[in-house]
Amino acid sequence: MSRYIALEGIDGAGKTSVLVALAERLEGEGHDVVCVREPGGTAVGESLRDLLLEGPPMSAWAEALMFAADRAQLVEEVVRPALARSAWVLSDRSVYSSLAYQGAGRGLGIGRVRQINEPGLSGTWPDMVMLLVVAPEAGLARQEKEDRIGSEGSSLLASVAEAFERLASREPDRFVVIDAEQSLGLVVDQAWAAVQL
Ligand code: Z5A
């Protein structure tokens, strides 16, 4: 059964909205549900989040390594203990965001970004990744708050969106791809149907 589920997609795809709705439905069925976000979700991670999203310009590798450090802390402190007690973990973004944004968007290489994340993950990869697909312009129009990375505009997002779709086609057993330009209600219903599989 898939219990570690990541919501992925470009900015404004609807990840947080869908995550909240899934958590409510799972809790309504009596499940123990832990919601996390990347970057963030731990004291170390929230400090890194401030630096990553609101801080000064930084090199692409510094950025990629900080996302990997944030994730290593989250997996050790929150995700693995939750899975060990049979809770569900719903994650707003995951290692796949690093593969798409830093690997493809920043041009560091998906393989090399995967390598720097592997030691911190130690095999704890999401069981299921729900990829919410929207066109970059649609995502940007929905965005409520711009961060350092999101403010770079639609050309970065176009390469990120393309990378997400490539990653999904390479791992069809892990990814569930949902058209997120549909109404939120329909998107949530499709996400919920995937959780029930
Ligand atoms: N990042 C990275 O580069 N590398 C990494 O490894 C990681 C992250 C982990 C984190 O941002 C930034 O870090 C992000 C990538 C980078 N920056 N960029 N670019 P984040 O995850 O905290 O936030 P975000 O993804 O950029 O934006 P967001 O606005 O939180 O997006 P969202 O969660 O996908 O959307 P939402 O909050 O659910 O919805 C946004 C609005 O759209 C809201 O008003 C909803 O009511 C509305 N909405 C949602 N769904 C629909 C539908 N279906 N129809 C109509 N309206 C909708």
Image (tube, rainbow, N blue to C red):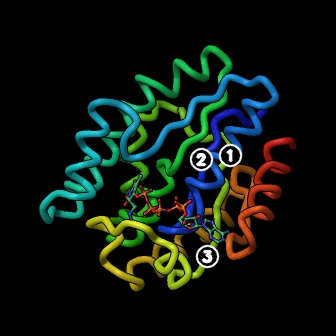
Label 2 to label 3: alpha-carbon separation:
17 Å
> Assess mark 3: CB under 8 A from ligand 1?
yes
Say whether disc 1 or disc 2 marks the residue closer to the N-terminus. Answer: 2
Q: Is mark 1 within 8 Å of ligand 1?
A: no
Q: Position of residue 193 (x, y in %)?
A: 85, 50
Residue nearest the observer in this picture, 135 or 103: 135
> Residue visible at 31% across and 67% down?
149
Q: Please tell me the numbered disc located at residue 128.
A: 1
Disc 2 residue type (three-letter): Ala
Quarter of the image with the C terminus is: top right
Alpha-carbon distance for marks 1 and 3? Answer: 19 Å
Question: Which of the two marks, 1 or 3, is nearer to us in this view?
Answer: 3
Disc 3 designates what residue?
A: 134
CB-based contact (under 8 Å), mark 1 and mark 2: yes
Which label sits in the foreground, 1 or 2?
2
Residue shown at 16% from the left, 57% from the top: 55
* Among numbered discs 2 and 3, the one appearing first in the sequence: 2
Q: Residue 94 appears at what percent x and percent y?
A: 49, 48
Q: Residue at x 38, y 55 (%)?
A: 113
Q: In the displayed structure, does residue 109 sit left or right of residue 166?
A: left
Q: Which residue is mark 2?
A: 6
The kind of residue on which mark 1 rests is: Met
